[in-house]
Image (tube, rainbow, N blue to C red):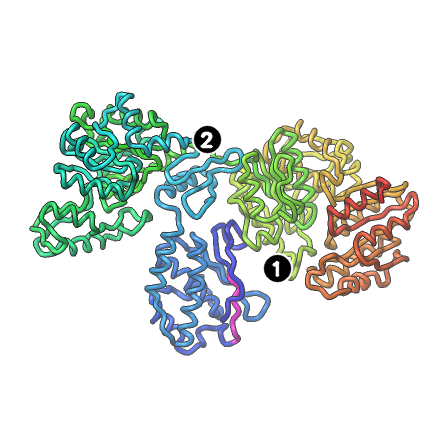
Amino acid sequence: MQITRIRALRGPNLWTRSTAIEAVVQCEPGECDYSALSGFEDRLRARFPKIGALQPHGAEQRLSLAHVLEVAALSLQAQAGCPVTFSRTQATVEAGTYQVVVEYTEEAVGRMAVEQAAALLQSALADTPFDADKVIADLRELDEDERIGPSTGSIVDAAVARGIPFRRLTSGSLVQLGWGSKARRIQAAELDQTSAVAESIAQDKDLTKRLLHAAGVPVPLGRPVKDVEDAWAVAQEVGLPVVVKPQDGNQGKGVVVNITTHEQLKAAYATASEFGDEIMVERFLPGHDFRLLVVGGQLVAAARREPPQVLGDGQHTIRELVDIVNQDPRRGSGHGTALTKVRLDDIAIARIATEGLTPDSVPAQGQRVVLRNNANLSTGGSATDVTDDVHPDIAARAVEAAQTIGLHICGVDVVCETMLRPLEEQNGGIVEVNAAPGLRMHLAPSFGKPRNVGAPMVDELFAPGQNGRIPLVAVTGTNGKTTTTRLIAHLFTSHGWRTAMTNTDGVYVNGRQIDSGDCSGPKSARNALAHPETDAAVLECARGGILREGLGFDRCQVAVVTNVGAGDHLGMNYINTVEDVAVLKRVIVQNVATDGYAVLNAADPLVAAMASASPGKVIYFAADRHHPVMATHRAQGNRVVYVDGDSIVAAESSWRETIALREIPITRNGSIIFQVENVMAAIAAAWGVGLPWQTIRRGLAGFVNDSDNAPGRFNVMDYRGATLIADYGHNPDAIRALVQAVDAMPAQRRSVVISGAGDRRDEDITEQTQILGRAFDDVILYQDACQRGRADGEVLALLQKGLQGAPRTRYVTEVHGEFNAIDHALARLAPGDLCLVLVDQVEEALEHLHRHVQGEA
C-alpha cells in the first residue's frame, strides 16, 4: 500500500461540508481484500485495540487496505479527543487506486493521523512494533497546540451559533468574524475596537490605579519603587501587610502577596524583578480574590479564585499530593484545558517553607497547604462561579473601572470578603484591570455554574440581527460562468455596492484588480471576502479549486450553475464522465443558505436535477417557458426566468417583470443565444439577492461586452470593414455556442483561428475542429504556448484530424505562434468577412488585436 497524494480540503467539498484530508492510496492486488491477508486484523487490533469496526458503513463488498486506513485515521483522531465523525473511501477507475477522505478539525492533526494510520497498517503487515498510545498522546498534544484556545474558542462558538462566518488569520488567536466591510476581528478575549492606548494603560498598574482613584473607584494605596529599600519605605507608609508585583505584569506572574517582614519583601522584590523592570508595592487587602468580567457596559460573569493548594491526608507527602491533584483530567499544561497543572517549583517551595514545610513533608489529615499566594488559574488555581452573588454596587464599580481605562472586554480583579456587600463597606478594592482576560474560570469553573461569556462578546461586535455576512453569489458551470460572474458583479456595482469579483482573469475589488491570473479558486475567494472594501461578492468557482481545496466560504446566498458539458477537463482527477462533473459542480448548490436561492439551467437535465440538493429555494431559467421543468416550477408558485418573444421575463406565480432584449447590449437584440442564457442567469441571481428591478435594468443596459468588461468573452471589433470576434472558447460545447452566435451574423467569408489545450482528451480536441469545419471557410491552426504535457505538434495533429472531410472548410494552414496566426488571418480578410479568433493568451492577444484595429500594427 502506498499513499501517492495527500491534500487538505479546507472548505465544503465534493465529499462533505466538513474540513477533511483526502489521500490517494494505491493498493497491490493482494491488498484489495484485507480479510484475505492471513492474521492481519489480529495483528492490527493487537497494536490498536480501539480501532473500531473495519466496515464503518455496513458495506458487504470486499474492503481494501485503503478502507482500513480510513478507519484507522479517524479512530486515532477520535482517541486523541478530536470531535470527528466523517470518513469515506471511494474506488477509482484505476484498479487498486482509492480516494480516502477523513474529517479533521485541525489540519496538522488530520495529516499526522493519516500518516500514522499508514504506519500502523505497515507495522501490522510486517509484524513490527507500533506504539499506539504514544501516537495518540502526540496527536492530542499537537491538537492542543494547534486548536484555538478556550477563550477565543468560546467567542468563535458564539459567533457560529449566530451564523457568523469566521476565519483564523494566524496559527494563534487572531480571528476574523464576518466578511468584507462587515468583518470584525478578535484576538483572544480582545476586540478590534479596543485601542492600544487602553491596553497600555491597563499594563501600567500605577497609572491604572491613579486613574481609578481619580474616578472614585476604591483601590489599595501604593506606588512604584526604585529598589528594595524604597519598597520597604512604601510598605511602612501604607502599612503592612503589602503586595509586591511587576508594574506591567499579567496572569499573576511575579505577584507576591501578604508580605509582613523585610526578608519576605526582599525575596518578593527579587521574584517580581524576574518578570518586569518596574516594581510596585501596595497595601495588601485581606479577603478573597475575585475576578469580574465586564463586556461593554455590563458585568457578565464573576468568579472567586483560590490559590493552588493541596489537602493533607496524613499519608502522602506534599509532592505526592500535588501529583494526585494533577491527575484530574481537567488539568493540563497549557490554556487548552479547564484547569492548569499545579507546579511544585521554587515559588511553591518558598511558599510552603514559610509554614516550615518541604515537598517531602506529610501534612496532617485536613491540613490545607497553599502553594502560591496568587490565585491565577494559569498557576494552578481554581475558581468558583459567584456571578449571581455580585452586589449591584460592586458590578457598577467594575463597569466604571473598565470604562475609565477604555477596555471593551475587561477582567477586573477585586479583593474583598464577599460579593454580597459594597466594597466600601468591607474595605475592599479593585487591585488590577486586565486587557484580554482569560475566560476559562467562567467557561468551566471548578465549582458552580458555567457562563457562556462568548455570546455577550459577539453581541458587542455585531448588533442584534446582524451576522457579519455580505451578499455572496457563487457561479460555476462548464461555459459562460466568467461572463455571468462579470455581469452579476456589474449589477451589484450599479446598486452602489463595492463589489469583489473573482474569476479566471483575476481578483477585482471595487473596480480595481488586486490579483491576476486564474483566480477562480478558494484562496482568491478568501482574499476577496477578507478585503475591507467588499460590500458584496461574486465568486467564480471552477472545478479545479473545488477538487483541490473545496470552497473558500461556508455558504452562499445564491449559487448559479450555467450548464454542465463534456469538455470540462474530463479524465482528470478521477472526474471521468459528465455526471461526475455535475456532482462536482453541485457542491455550490449544496451550500446555499436556507434563505437563499439556487439559480439553475432548466434546459440542462444535469443542472435541473440539482434542485433537490439546495437547502434554499430554486430559480430556474431557460429560453423556453414551456419546458416541463419551467412550467411545473412556475405552476407551483416558484420563480422562473425565460424568453418571451423579444423580451426576458422574470415571473413568480401571476407576477411578471419584463426587460426587452434590445435594452441589453450583450445579447445583440437576442441574436447571441448563449449571451441571452448568461443574462437570464445574472437576472435570476440579482433577483435572488433582492436587487431592485430598476437597478437590474440600468445595470444590464450599461454592460457592454468589450475587452474591458469581459475580456475574451465574445469581444466584437471592426477591422477594415470586416468583423473580428475574440473569444476564449476552449471546449466543444463552447465552440457549438460560438458557431450558433456567429451564424446569426452576416458575412461573406468566415475564418477561424484556433489552437487546443493539451490537457484535454484527444476526442475533445478533435471534436472542436469537427464543429468548426462545418461552419468556417478558412481554418488557421497554431500551437498553444503551453502544451500541458503534450509532445510538440501532437495537438495540431489532433486538430487536423478533426478537419478531415470537413464539408465547408476549403483553406487550412498551420502557423507557428498565436500572434503570427492572428496576423495571417487578418491579412486574408476583405470587407464583409468575419474572423473568429479563439485566443489562448487572452490579455496579450486582445492587445495585439487592438493594435491592428487602431492601425498601429
Which of the 4 image quarters holds residue 276? top left
Three-letter amino acid code at the position of disc 1: Ile
Q: Can residue 706 be found in the magenta stretch?
A: no
Position of 91 relative to 297 (above/below): below
Position of 797 relative to 334 (above/below): below
Q: Can residue 27 be found in the magenta stretch?
A: yes
- Magenta residues, as a range? 23-29
Q: Is residue 117 left or right of residue 542?
A: left
Q: Is residue 55 left or right of residue 624?
A: left
Three-letter amino acid code at the position of disc 2: Gly
Q: Residue at x 70, y 34 (%)?
A: 649
Cα distance in 3D space between marks 1 and 2: 42 Å
Residue 614: mark = none
Position of 28 relative to 552 (above/below): below
Q: Secondary structure at mark 1?
A: loop
Q: Would you name the residue on which mark 1 appears?
A: 575
Residue 693, x across and y down, in percent: 65, 29
Q: Residue at x 83, y 61 (%)?
A: 803
Residue 504, x across and y down, in percent: 66, 47
Image quarter hosting the C terminus: top right
Which of the 4 image quarters holds residue 296? top left
Q: Would you name the residue on which mark 2 appears?
A: 465
Near mark 2 (Cα within 10 A), the count class, few <14, some 14-19 or many ≥20, is few
Residue 804, x across and y down, in percent: 84, 63
Residue 218, x across and y down, in percent: 23, 25
